Image (spheres, rainbow, N blue to C red):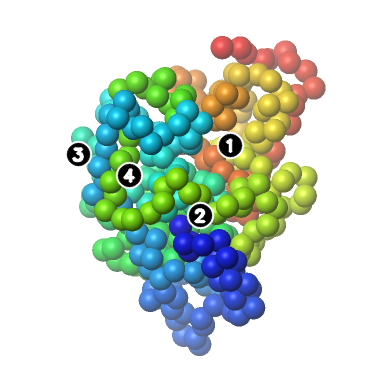
């Protein structure tokens, strides 16, 4: 969470809008992080409210078999990953309070990240230059998106960019991994032997309560963003964002719902792929011509546009000659 109570979030947001971030004539610092080698404008970095680690990352996560996860309901949202033949689910109602899970699957270090303000769940390999990194929550935001930090160098990392934006590792990219943002019912049906992140986190949190209230349906943003989108879509419209090189395309869920096709081909930057839409699961993904799931971003429209303002936006085709059904 950003603060235990929604009113605290709003209070911090108002305070930040009325005052500029800490600046100096040399190198800026925020929440104890030195913003050196910045690849973004330091004045665009804002405090989210808590200090570093005020939102505690989970560094020793525990997991349960699906049948023991009686704290989950069919329509609860989860982030799901399949790696080395193992399926794992990370409930959003836990990630709302922690945002980062440092995990390992069969010896491969990964980091699962979730930004409640952008609705974005992303998984990355935690290995950089052959060394596994551990990540925490800096308490800072860029374009309303969580800035992670690695404990080894204290570089700040943009979640949506998947890149270090300040510090010794500035410019370094993380390898994004495919991750599905779906319902527990859908994930459990598809992967009945999945393991699930336990509520035994070592922290006292009310995981049955959403600390962000009705934020997901409100048009309000708590923090400033660059490249604010025109009001053609609700700012919290969920989109599937596909990136191929420096080309970007967004698939609004309302458009996919209107289109009504569960499976259809598309392309971007001369790269062909297939969009798979599951209305019941409230989930979409892209697969390549070999059927491999591509790393994409599912999140709020305003966030995708803030980072990728030149994005294309999928619209219902006028003809359906190339339509493919599952």
The residue furthest right is 318
Q: Secondary structure at mark 2?
A: loop
Q: Secondary structure at mark 4?
A: loop
Q: CA distance from mark 2 to mark 1?
A: 24 Å
Q: Do tag 2 and tag 1 residues touch (Cβ < 8 Å)? A: no
Which numbered disc, 1 or 3, marks the residue that appears first in the sequence?
3
Q: CA distance from mark 4 to mark 1?
A: 28 Å
For image coordinates 78% across by 18% down, the residue present is 319
In this view, the residue in front, 298 or 1, is 1
Q: Which residue is mark 4?
A: 199
Q: Which residue is mark 3?
A: 107
Q: CA distance from mark 1 to mark 3?
A: 30 Å
Q: Do tag 2 and tag 3 residues touch (Cβ < 8 Å)? A: no
Q: Which residue is mark 1?
A: 240
Q: Secondary structure at mark 3?
A: loop
Q: CA distance from mark 4 to mark 2?
A: 16 Å
Task: Kindly tell me whether residue 65 is visible in this rendering.
Answer: yes
Please tell me whether mark 2 or mark 3 is closer to you in this view.
2
In this view, the residue in front, 187 or 326, is 187
Q: CA distance from mark 2 to mark 3?
A: 34 Å
How many neighbours does mark 4 have within 10 angstroms: few (below 14), some (14-19), or many (20 or more)? many
The numbered mark at residue 211 is 2
Please tell me whether mark 4 or mark 3 is closer to you in this view.
4
**Left or right: 233 as drawn, with respect to 226:** right
How many numbered tags mark residues here?
Answer: 4
For image coordinates 38% across by 39% down, the residue present is 90
In this view, the residue in front, 94 or 149, is 94
Image spot of residue 253 (x, y percent): 65, 33
Image spot of residue 110 (x, y percent): 31, 44
Image spot of residue 157 (x, y percent): 42, 59
């Amino acid at each position: 969470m950003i603060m235990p109570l929604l009113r605290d979030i709003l209070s911090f947001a108002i305070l930040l809008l009325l005052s500029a971030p800490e600046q100096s004539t040399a190198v800026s610092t925020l929440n104890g992080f030195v913003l050196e080698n910045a690849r973004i404008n330091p004045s665009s970095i804002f405090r989210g409210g808590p200090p570093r680690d005020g939102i505690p990352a989970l560094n020793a996560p525990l997991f349960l078999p699906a049948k023991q996860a009686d704290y989950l309901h069919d329509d609860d949202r989860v982030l799901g990953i399949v790696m080395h033949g193992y399926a794992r689910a990370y409930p959003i109602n836990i990630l709302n309070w922690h945002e980062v899970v440092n995990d390992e699957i069969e010896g491969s270090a990964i980091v699962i990240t979730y930004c409640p303000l952008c609705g974005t769940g992303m998984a990355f390999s935690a290995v950089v230059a052959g060394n596994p990194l551990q990540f925490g929550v800096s308490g800072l935001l860029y374009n309303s998106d969580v800035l992670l930090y690695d404990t080894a160098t204290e570089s700040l990392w943009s979640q949506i960019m998947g890149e270090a934006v300040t510090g010794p590792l500035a410019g370094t990219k993380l390898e994004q991994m495919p991750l599905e943002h779906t319902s527990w019912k859908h994930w459990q049906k598809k992967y009945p032997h999945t393991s699930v992140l336990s509520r035994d986190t070592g922290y006292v949190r009310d995981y049955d309560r959403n600390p962000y209230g009705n934020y997901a349906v409100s048009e309000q943003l708590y923090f400033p963003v660059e490249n604010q989108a025109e009001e053609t879509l609700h700012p919290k419209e969920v989109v599937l964002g596909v990136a191929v090189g420096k080309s970007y395309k967004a698939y609004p869920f309302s458009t996919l719902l209107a289109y009504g096709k569960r499976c259809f081909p598309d392309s971007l930057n001369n790269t062909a792929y297939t969009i798979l839409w599951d209305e019941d699961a409230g989930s979409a993904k892209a697969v390549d011509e070999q059927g491999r799931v591509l790393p994409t971003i599912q999140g709020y429209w305003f966030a995708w546009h803030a980072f990728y303002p030149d994005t294309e936006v999928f619209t219902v085709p006028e003809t359906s000659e190339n339509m493919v059904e599952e």
